[in-house]
Each structure stands twice: as structure tokens, then as C-alpha cells.
Image: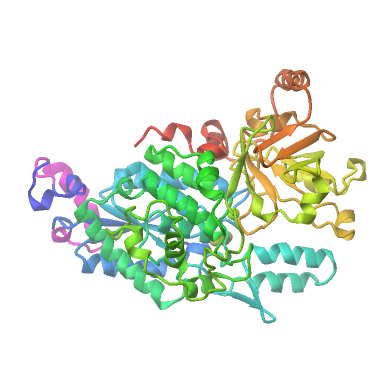
Amino acid sequence: MSSEPDRKYRSSAWFNNHDNPGMTALYIERYLNYGITRDELQSGKPIIGIAQTGSDLSPCNRHHIELAKRVREGIRDAGGICFEFPVHPIQETGKRPTAGLDRNLAYLGLVELLYGYPIDGVVLTIGCDKTTPACLMAAATVNIPAIALSVGPMLNGWHKGERTGSGTIVWKARQMLAAGEIDYEGFMELVASSAPSVGYCNTMGTATTMNSLAEGLGMQLPGSAAIPAPYRERGQISYETGRRIVEMVEQDLKPSDIMTRESFENAIVLNSAIGGSTNAPIHLNAIARHLGIALDNDDWQQIGHDISLLVNLQPAGDYLGEDYYHAGGVPAVVAELIRAGKLPHPGALTANGRSIGENCADRQIALPDVIKTYGSPLKEKAGFLNLKGNLFDSAIMKTSVISDEFRNRYLSDPNDPDAFEGRAVVFDGPEHYHDNIDNPDLEIDEHCLLFIRGAGPIGYPGAAEVVNMQPPAALIKRGIHALPCIGDGRQSGTSGSPSILNASPEAAAMGGLALLRTGDRVRIDLNKGTANILISEDELLARREELVARGGYNYVDSQTPWQEIQRSIVGQYDRGMILEPAEKYQ
Ligand code: FES
Ligand code: MG
């Protein structure tokens, strides 16, 4: 390529290709038709995409339609030209059967747009759970300069003087409805109170988690993730983000320069400190794979398990998104981790061209009850364990949510507080669970472990968030509000139950869960990191042969073409649940 200033950028292959005026004219003419001039398109200024994830279908991200105006002004003021375009919408709460199907579809679509159109750099408008990984995965694959912009959380929800948090209030309201403490109207009112403004979930669910981690990875401007959607600072950071992407294009600062193995290790530590969602390993492992970086669930245990929980947000704690922002957001948490010597790589580069340490080290915690110091955390060892055994090769567990009462009920040996045993009760998918949980023939008591299978990336296409299952009504009436739940589904980041989830390989991929039967004894040993059905090797082998003879584990049919396509090429959770053939495109 020539070094003339007007041919500096990738977009010049479309708009400034003097060797091929025929094609250049063809590329240019249609973009003129809404009023942009030829001078602008041929000025040699970088063309900046705004990957727009907001729409009426995706209310969590809808405010990005407003924010994009400020992004545009920032791009213009810094000397860029803006092309805004839609990303396949993803709404976590609105998509049937599950938004888990849409992350990879949005990824696929965005890769095509970034690759196939004259875009020199891109602002990724992130927010609702899977919009963040979808955008970062696409940026990783195409690897043109990219910066993320959070839409920000909703304002705090309030009901009768108490904070009501997204998702978390639904679990509570369901129990109140079941106990007859509220009626249908009261139920609807209570749940709706948690959504008082534009923005994404105000709890530490998957959205706040992934937006915080996008900042921790270095892909957003510092302090950007936690600003509530309606605040003036949200518009201001949108403007700054627009300005900054133009500079990033000039400096050719690419996702692969920012998202390195070091920044993923930082993000894993940050995830433990904020009490991040169990969906985070799936998404970060996916982004890493699209960059060619090795990252798996053993890394999550090794780097993240011992880190303490500092952020006191629902569901693990008391507060919500506005409080997180006023307490200092991600920079205050990172600063505390640096002071405690726990952030592994303070020198990791971020989108503003400075390291995460330079950006954050001198930040203070403004509300000490919302962000705790490392010396007096909310919980110790708040990260994930990666369990293995004849049930699965990998499954994630947050051990910090296990109560003593819980521990004692399943103790198999009084001298070993970390080994549990129970009788398995197995459900094949969420419908089977709902139809049978109160069936007395299953003899479910407080020493049972509830299993769900057929809920993974292949089995329930896209993977359903169904692992935390309520005990039978009879047990709830006796005061047993939770049983340990284990399965090849996911779990909502807004739920705080002690579960073993994201089991890989799933039953539909012939994982050990497919061999389990109701009545089997199962042993979980947290010290050894194991989860096993207590049957002989011979019995296990015989069950596997029988399963193969039956033609494998039986799962629900696909309802759409994409379900069928994704099922045929999707990988398992521990590998990021990505479209396997996509990995080689880097
Ligand atoms: Fe969209 Fe929670 S449902 S952020
Ligand atoms: Mg979710």
C-alpha cells in the first residue's frame, strides 16, 4: 500500500483506490445518496463504525441509540467519519427459548460487517449479558481497532423503602407468591419496581459482570463501566469514547494489543473481587479463543479461586448499580487489588493507551460499605472451583455460597468438611423438572442432590439458565429452601444458589451426566476437586454401552434453522461455547 496520507487506512481500499476507479466509483456512489459528500468519503479520514446493539427488541441496550449521538460528535471532533449500523439484537429476558443462541449469531453477523465494509475502527455498544461477549469476540476475530462503550446499568430499583434488584427480586417474589404473601398484582408490581430507567440489570448479574470485565480487560475507558445509563457522565464518556477510537485508529491500537493473556488474568481476578457471574468463564474463554490465547477453567480456579469478594452488590450482597458507581466502580476495585498485591499484571495496556495500573492505582474507595477493603472482604476465596470426575470433565462451582447448615446436611465424613454425599434425583430438561419436582415417587428429601441434564449448548440449543431448581413444595414448607443443584445448564448471574453448573461435556455430547440414574449416590469432594457417581468402572462401562446402543442421549428437536446449524458446530462450555470452525479465522 502507498504511504500517501489519503490511503493510510483500510477504508481507502473502497473509497480511494486510484488503481481501480470503476470499483471506487461503485463503492462511493450509493453512500452519497443520503447526503454525505464525496469529499468526506475521500478525505482520507478514518471511518469509524458504531456497532449498534440497541433497538426496541433489546431494551437493555436501547439507550445506545441516544448515546450514539454523543459518540458521533466525539468521532467528528477528533477527525473521523461515522458509520452506524445494527448488530443482531440480543435481549436476555425476551428471547425464546434462550438468548444463549444469539451470542454466536451476533458474533457471526458482526464479523461479516467489520470484515466486509470500509470500517477502520469500531465502537462496540455493549450492555445486556451476551451483547458484550458477542461484540468482543467479533473484534477479536477481525482485529481492527475497537473500543467498547457500556450503556450503563439502570438506576436502583426501590419498593417500599428497600432496594429491588434486577432478577434477584424475581427469585424472592416467586417465593413470596408461593407462600401467599403477595398476589398476582403485587408480584408484577414488585418485579417491575426493579426496572426504573433505561439501562441494563442493576444487580451484579451477567451484564454488570461482563461490562466490568470489558473495562478490566482494557477495552473501555477507565471508569466507564459502572456509570448508570441516565447519568450525564454516561453521555460524556460516550463523547470521549468517540474521540478516543479515532486516536486508536491513528495509532493502530488493536484488540490483540490490549486483550492479552495478562489482561485475561487480570479479568479473572477482578471477576472474583466483584462477585461476577458464572457465565463469565464461558464468555472470556470464548473471546480468548478467538484471539488464539489459551484460557480454560483450570486457569479460572488457579488464578481466581483464592481472591476475596469486595463488591457488596446483590445477589451476593446488599447494594445496586448506582451504589457501585458512587463507590468508585471498577477503578476503585482495581486500585484495592493493586494495594493488596493481588492484581497480577498492573502493566497491562488499556484502550486509553495507558496501563490499567496507571489508570487506577491512585483511585480511592468512596463508599466503604459498597466496596470493601481486601483486609476485610465480604467473603474469602470467592472465585470458582473447576470440578472433575466421572460425571464431567469440567464444571464450575462458587464455593463461597455454601452455608454451614448446608455443609452439615451432606457431610459424608465428620472429619472431612469438604466432602459431600447425597442421593441423585435426575431431570431430563426443564420441562421434565417442572412436571415432576413434586412427584412423591421420587422421594426427594433434604439429603438429595438435584441434577438437570439435556440443558447444554447442544441439548437445549444455546444452553438454558435452568440449573438452580427449587426443591419440592413439601420441603419448602418444612423450611428447606434450597438443595444442591448440578447440571449441564447455565445459571442466571442474578441468582445466588450454590450450584455446580456449566458441566462439560454435556449429556447430549455423551458426557458422564448421561449415565447418571435417580437413586445413585454421588460424592463431591471440594478438596480434591472431584465429582463422581459412586458406581464401579464395570457398571459405568455397561451404562455407556447401553447409551450408545440406544443411539445416544435423546434431546429436544430444533425449532429454527439457526438452532440446527449452531448445534452441529458449537463447542462445550469450557471451550467458550464458540462456533468451532470460527477459531481458525484470526
Ligand atoms: Fe439485559 Fe439483564 S436482562 S442486562
Ligand atoms: Mg443471563
Residue 529, picture quadrant: top right
Q: Residue at x 80, y 45 (%)?
A: 410
Q: Quadrant of ligand 2?
A: bottom right
Point out the stretch of residues depicted in magenta.
17-40
Q: Tell me residue 299's x, y (percent).
A: 50, 41
Our reading of the magenta stretch's main secondary structure is helix
Question: Does the rendering let one see residue 297?
Answer: yes
- Reply yes or no: does residue 221 show up in magenta: no
Q: Tell me residue 6's x, y (percent).
A: 11, 52
Residue 507, picture quadrant: top right
Is residue 486 placed above or below 314 in the rendered structure?
A: above
Is residue 222 placed above or below 89 in the rendered structure?
A: below
As drawn, the residue found furthest toward the bottom would be 161
Is residue 228 placed above or below 136 in the rendered structure?
A: below
The residue nearer to you, when weighing 430 against 527, is 527
Is residue 461 placed above or below 231 in the rendered structure?
A: above
The residue nearer to you, when weighing 308 against 36, is 308
Q: Is residue 586 left or right of residue 544?
A: left
